[in-house]
Image (cartoon, helix red, strand yellow):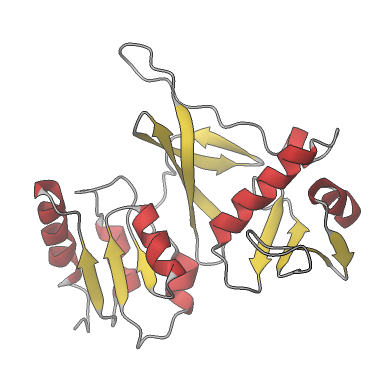
Amino acid sequence: MRNLTELAAAVGGTVKGAFVRLPGPGHSSKDDSLSIWPTDRHPDGFEVQSFAGDPIEKCRTYVRQRIAERGRSGSIANSKLKKPQLPAVRGPKVKRTIDSEFIYRQANGTPYLRVLKTKPKGFFQTQPVGNRWKNGKPKGPEIPYRLPELIAASPEKPIFVCEGEKDADNLAALGLIATTNSGGAGKWGSDLNRWFAGRLVYILPDNDEPGEHHAKKVAGNLRAVPERT
């Protein structure tokens, strides 16, 4: 997005200072709890902040929908927000559609990894390269989902490790500190362990055999983290 005026026009918001303000997802037209601003550091071309406590990814999806609905020529809707291309899958051709997306962010909020969930059920990982997403996960260390929120939380608050991004988002919406690992059950890597030092952790696996094995793997990893309860 080039500037605040263009961004405001694209979403139907109002420029206030260094930000564009507009109603948050599900809020009344008189509400202006959502603040957005243009940036070249995110593949979407904008950043968001909710003063009503709405989940960041929910707000980001909401803004993209507003831009797409308004369909302004030359706006971010036509430059930054190209429809994600799903990776090719071997075997019989199956028409897949994107059901949801989950973005893993570094400690400073910079996008690091995006997980796409599709219908029929499937999961694909992409990484940011410039202002677009490239198929495949980053070559760097793994990071936990919702890392900035995990870091910002009081050390006294427990962390709930779920088996999936959707579950983590649902718990976060209830005011809890929740996270997960990318790749699903059994994919917990040792890179993740350091973020849980000194924290009380509750593991919430799926109620099946893979979930049981996953919980044991996570617990085994975190037992080696210093000062865990």
Find the residue positioned furthest to the right: 5
- Does residue 109 sit above or below 65 in this rendering? below
Q: In terms of depth relative to the viewer, which is nearer, 107 or 52?
A: 52
| Residue 133 lies in quadrant | top right
- Give how far across and how far down residue 80 sits, in percent: 71, 39
Whether residue 69 can be seen here: yes
- Give how far across and how far down residue 176 sits, in percent: 39, 74
- Does residue 120 sit above or below 155 in this rendering? above
x 76%, y 33%: residue = 78
Task: Quarter of the image for the C terminus: give it.
Answer: bottom left
Whether residue 142 can be seen here: no
Q: In terms of depth relative to the viewer, which is nearer, 106 or 211?
A: 211
| Residue 167 lies in quadrant | bottom left
- Does residue 88 sit above or below 81 in this rendering? above
Q: In terms of depth relative to the viewer, which is nearer, 71 or 7?
A: 71
Total numbered labels placed on residues in the image: 0
- Give how far across and how far down residue 169 sits, in percent: 42, 60
x 39%, y 73%: residue = 177
